[in-house]
């Protein structure tokens, strides 16, 4: 009995204790919520004190199949027991199978595997530059975009707050105003080699670009012989209701980057392109020690097989519509705080009013206290990124909690 009481007391402080240990050893790059997560299953997380959370963030669009999906866990365990790493000096079956799946289900026919989104974008930037040849190196991206935290991808990112203090930025990046085709065209010069863009800006506040705009970018790329690079790191892997967002746009990019949900939680990124463009990279042009690691690749193969099964993506579209409709009803109920809902599939944003924006952080914190994880993106919208396996009941539960929080605020 005494042992049990002591264990419960220890558990009662477990979150705080881990936070205190963390503060002693980590460089302070993160502001964290006071929870030490210990277990995940489906759309639920449990912290060190036994509190449960309904997860509408999925590790920021990473755990598309939810936490510890049995097929992915089994693939990871199987591969970890056979071979975990050999370097890219040798072939392995998991990465081959992954590249076969990616090319079979996209416009692309060549793949480079990396470990993260930023690295996938770095590979895309390098490929665009070497493809374009001498003195064509400039990449136009959009204001409000997010492309990663390495120096080149920070330079490509169209938000000054990520660049501040790290100047000078690497050369060869400029930013066109969001959604304005004419100004983008006026920025194209003899030095331009590519346009880099997210079909829907995730970090920027769940801001979709319209179809006409994106088709316009495709036209410019054809007209001026530029590469169209789609950063689908957040929108890819079923998030928008199709395997890739470009499928809904009536256009095809030249290069596409993936990461986040690709390995359902294991670190892996990919840069996809056509055979013709890929030929600009030759042996030695680019490499990654861990890229395409067998365990991460096996996780990605298992993830893709689940997503490609009959009916999976149709369900994402149906549930995305349901989440959208429920959020719309909330927006109508709380017009002082929220204006509208935008997004595609299961990436949805509740856009806040000026007064609402003031409370954005507080709304997320109150939701956290109530045991529901969401976030506030781009200082403009509450962002909802549930695992794609979320149920309608779980959507109802989140909406119920959000209604309580908005009511209190
Ligand atoms: C998350 C994200 C990145 C960066 O990915 P990392 O794995 O954190 O390097 C790049 N682009 C977009 C659109 C993202 O959402």
Image (tube, grey):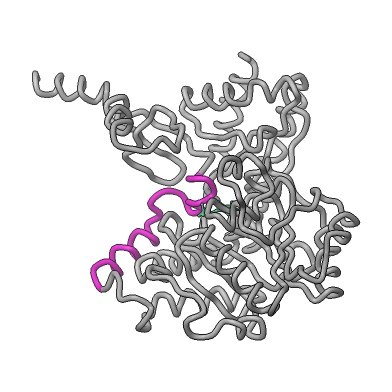
Q: Quadrant of the N terminus?
A: top left
Q: Nearer the viewer, residue 10 or 130?
A: 130
Q: Residue at x 51, y 56 (%)?
A: 261
- Tell me which segment is drawn in magenta: 58-82
Where is residue 180? Give x, y as percent. 86, 51
Q: Nearer the viewer, residue 136 or 199?
A: 136
Where is residue 64? Give x, y as percent. 51, 53
388 left or right, relative to 21: right
Where is residue 326? Give x, y as percent. 69, 34
Q: Nearer the viewer, residue 12 or 215?
A: 215
Magenta span main SS: helix
* Looking at the image, residue 287 lies above or below residue 213: below
Extreme-left residue of the structure: 2
47 left or right, relative to 179: left
* Looking at the image, residue 370 lies above or below residue 193: above
* Looking at the image, residue 20 lies above or below residue 102: above
Extreme-right residue of the structure: 182
Q: Quadrant of residue 35?
A: top left
Q: Quadrant of residue 272?
A: bottom right
Residue 60 lies in magenta, yes or no?
A: yes
Q: Quadrant of the C terminus?
A: top right
Residue 12 lies in magenta, yes or no?
A: no
Q: Residue at x 43, y 54 (%)?
A: 265
């Amino acid at each position: 009995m005494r042992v049990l009481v002591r264990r419960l007391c220890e558990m009662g402080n477990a979150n705080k204790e881990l936070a205190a240990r963390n503060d002693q050893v980590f460089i302070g790059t993160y502001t964290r919520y006071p929870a030490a997560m210990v277990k995940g299953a489906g759309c639920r997380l449990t912290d060190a004190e036994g509190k449960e959370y309904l997860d509408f963030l999925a590790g920021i669009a990473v755990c598309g199949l939810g936490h510890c999906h049995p097929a992915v866990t089994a693939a990871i365990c199987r591969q970890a027991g056979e071979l975990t790493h050999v370097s890219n000096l040798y072939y392995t079956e998991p990465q081959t199978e992954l590249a076969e799946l990616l090319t079979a289900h996209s416009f692309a026919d060549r793949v480079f595997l990396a470990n993260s989104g930023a690295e996938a974008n770095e590979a895309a930037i390098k490929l665009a530059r070497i493809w374009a040849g001498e003195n064509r190196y400039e990449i136009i991206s959009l204001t409000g975009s997010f492309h990663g935290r390495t120096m080149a991808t920070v330079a490509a990112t169209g938000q000054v707050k990520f660049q501040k203090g790290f100047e000078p930025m690497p050369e060869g990046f400029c930013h066109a105003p969001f959604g304005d085709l004419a100004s983008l065209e006026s920025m194209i010069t003899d030095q331009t080699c590519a346009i880099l863009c997210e079909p829907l800006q995730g970090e920027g506040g769940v801001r979709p670009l319209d179809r006409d705009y994106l088709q316009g970018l495709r036209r410019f790329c054809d007209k001026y012989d530029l590469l169209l690079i789609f950063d689908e790191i957040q929108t890819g892997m079923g998030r928008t209701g199709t395997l890739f967002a470009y499928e809904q746009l009536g256009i095809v990019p030249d290069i596409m980057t993936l990461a986040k949900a690709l390995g359902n939680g294991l670190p892996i990124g990919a840069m996809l392109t056509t055979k013709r463009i890929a030929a600009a990279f030759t042996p030695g042009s680019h490499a990654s020690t861990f890229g395409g690691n067998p365990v991460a690749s096996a996780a990605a193969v298992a993830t893709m097989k689940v997503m490609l099964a009959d009916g999976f993506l149709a369900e994402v579209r149906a549930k995305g519509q349901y989440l959208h409709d429920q959020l719309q009803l909330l927006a109508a109920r709380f017009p002082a705080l929220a204006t509208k809902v935008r997004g595609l599939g299961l990436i949805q944003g509740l856009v806040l009013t000026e007064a609402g924006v003031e409370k954005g952080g507080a709304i997320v914190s109150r939701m956290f206290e109530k045991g529901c994880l969401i976030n506030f993106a781009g200082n403009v919208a509450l962002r909802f990124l549930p695992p794609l396996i979320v149920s309608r009941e779980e959507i109802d539960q989140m909406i119920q909690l959000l209604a309580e929080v908005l009511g209190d605020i």
